[in-house]
Image: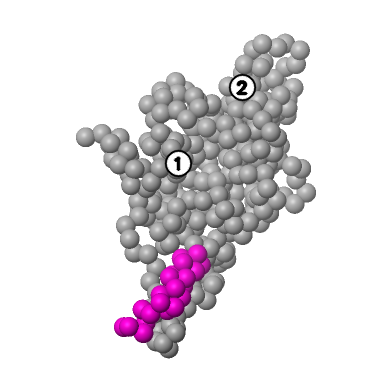
Amino acid sequence: MSNIFSGSAIVAWVGAILWTIGLVFNANATQEKHGKSVSEVLQVPSTIETESGKEVGFQQSNQPHEDLDAVLWIQTSAEYGAVARQTFRAARAAVGDALVDSKWTASTEQKKIFDSKTDRKLSELPPAVVLDVDETVLDNSRYQVGLIESGGEYSPEGWKAYVEKQVATPVPGAVEFVKACRTAGVTVIFVTNREHDVETATRENLIAHGLMEKDDPDLIFTKYEKEEWTSDKKSRREELARKYRILLLLGDDLNDFIATQYHSSSEVRRKVGDQYKDWFGERWFILPNPNYGGWEQSLYDWENAVSSSTKRKRKREKMVR
């Protein structure tokens, strides 16, 4: 024991632990589409030899993690696939209704533009559907697995590394929906809060799964692609509303459909959702995302820098008893 925990060995041991945690996290980002395990992809050793020549074993984090059930529901349940396919099937039917109604729009921004201007008719614009990317057409649950296995939390650097590996897979029903829209002559546009510097990787990931074609024009509108394109998607929807008749909006977060107050509370978000309740299932179609989003951040007042324990405390306070 004294040899294993000598000064230099301790430094090596701590360094090895940190190295392994990093590997486990990045493993999820580098998993191949055919589902290789963490150890297969990275060839992570189950033991490491100390200075004394003895081997010490490693274990992945087995600590409780609040995303565990949510990730498993997405990855393993029949119910998640059923809900996703059901949503896209209903959206396909709505596209048909929207195409024959020349006054139909799913954009509140577009409605305001054409209510105030008469120089151009809404029916003259080419039809389009606007979709979010993450947890709407691409499933990133493997990224969440990396956080669970490492005991880590979201970081912009880790997320960027994951996106650049292009290992996200299609949400059930998404590919069929996109192909049906294209067959009907409807332009498919992606409005995502992925940063602009990962747009190329995002495009390649979408192309790989048939969600875009190689010769498609730039139909991905990323955050800060223009200075005014912040995480609030309103400015991008306004720009698109002047070029296309927006038939449907699809996403996993309220921000994909309507602008709310900056960092609004969960109560305000629910009121906005209730205000447009008749639009959901007709013009707006939402996919389930139990892992993250505005719904979660609003529970701890959008203070992402506070500790995990503080976030959990604030979340527990929001439960209805």
Q: Residue at x 74, y 42 (%)?
A: 218
Q: Residue at x 36, y 42 (%)?
A: 311
Q: Amino acid at mark 2?
A: Glu
Sequence-wise first label, 1 or 2: 2
What element does badge 1 sit on?
A: loop
Q: Is residue 271 above or below residue 233?
A: above
Where does the N terminus fall, quadrant-wise? bottom left
Contact? badges 1 and 2 (CB < 8 Å)? no
Which region of the structure is painted magenta? 1-24
Which residue is the site of mark 1?
Answer: 304
Q: Residue at x 35, y 51 (%)?
A: 66
- The answer to whether residue 248 is seen in the rendering is no
- Image quadrant in which you'd find residue 123: top right
Identity of the residue drawn at 49% across and 32% down: 254
Q: Position of residue 27 (x, y in %)?
A: 52, 65
Q: Quadrant of residue 6?
A: bottom left
Q: Which residue is under mark 2?
A: 109
